[in-house]
Image (cartoon, helix red, strand yellow):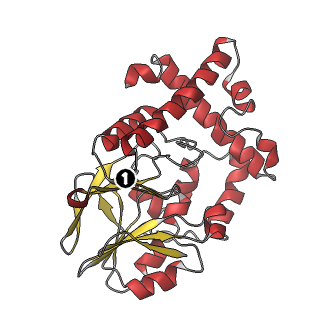
Amino acid sequence: MERVRIDESITYLVPSRQASASFLGCCGLVVKDGRTVVIDGNMGPSETLPMLERERPQVCVVSHFHVDHSRWGHEAASIPGTVVYVPLAEKRYLADVDHFVERCGVPVDLAGGWKQWLSGFAGLKPVPHAVGLSPGEVIEAGRVRIEVMDAAGHSPGHQAYWIADRRILFCVDIGVDAFGPWYGWQDADLALYVGSIRRLAALDARLLVTSHGGLIDTDIETTLLGCIEVMRRREDCIRTDLDAGSSIEECAARGHIYGDVSRFVPPLDRMYGVWEANMVREHARIIGMGGLDAII
């Protein structure tokens, strides 16, 4: 893992390429000013616990339930004196692995294998005593105040974190990386997603901290609103297919979002195909409401 110093109180944590590529790690923050807060400190199975033992945080925050952000929750809970916070809307996801699996939208015949991967290779374990955290609450790391922002859409309780006096925004998984916004599990919501992007873009941040796209210090509002443009381009392709009479499954098979899923080894090819279909289905729902432009 790599540590990038942002200022005297804030450090950006970057997991190894291997952890990121295998969905076992994400970038996070350590905020330390007499009191230590770690947000999304998932550095992968081999590096998370040593990092936590070194930092000894009083507070650990899981931004949302997706495995690359949540699998470290039980490790954080094992540190004496540490309180683990999770989005209030997603407490059950973190406390109940079966519920987690169900909400991923994996086909029934693959659900057992998916659960085995999560619990085995990924090391996901329940965090039953995590404390629910709601938008508008403030986490204090000494003099550094971190406001919890509603960034739902990517997941039901997806959160971002705003340090107003330094104009630093940790936008988590809002989607400014090369792939763009992701809404492939069945409880994603495009309408909420668009609202979250616009709300974060209006904050006038000077530094954008991301889970998968590095640190961004220029054209931040344009970068965030660019996520909606990615959605709009996808919508145009999907609308064309649906208007021509294609079904959701036929449209998804064209790979407007993931491309050719056959490049993934089984059973990942089927899983990515299902997640593409979920995204197409969500676009179809929004198209039925008049499209993205109608909800902006």
Residue at x 64%, y 42% (from the top left corner): 275
Asked if residue 98 lies left or right of residue 130, the reply is: right
Q: Give me the residue at 60% from left, 36% from top.
A: 278
- Name the quarter where the C terminus is drawn: top left
Residue 50 position, x and y percent, is: 50, 85
The x and y percentages for residue 177 are: 54, 49
In this view of the protein, which residue sits in the foreground, 165 or 191?
165
Q: Name the residue that disc number 1 marks.
A: 159
Residue at coordinates 60% horizontally, 80% vertically from top-left? 46
Q: Closest to the observer: 168 or 120?
A: 168
Q: Quadrant of residue 97?
A: bottom right
Residue at x-position 43% and y-position 77% = 76
Q: Is residue 288 visible?
A: yes
Q: Position of residue 155 (x, y in %)?
A: 46, 47
The residue carrying pointer 1 sits among few (fewer than 14), some (14 to 19) or many (20 or more) residues within 10 Å by Cα, namely: many
Above or below, 5 against 181 in this view is: below
Q: Is residue 41 left or right of residue 178?
A: left
- SS for callout 1: strand
90 shown above or below 50:
above
- The single residue placed furthest to the top in the displayed view is 244
Q: Position of residue 264 (x, y in %)?
A: 78, 50
Residue 189 visible in this rendered orientation of the protein: no
* Nearer to me, 101 or 289: 289
State which quadrant residue 210 falls in.
bottom left
Quadrant containing the N terminus is bottom right
Kind of residue at badge 1: Gln
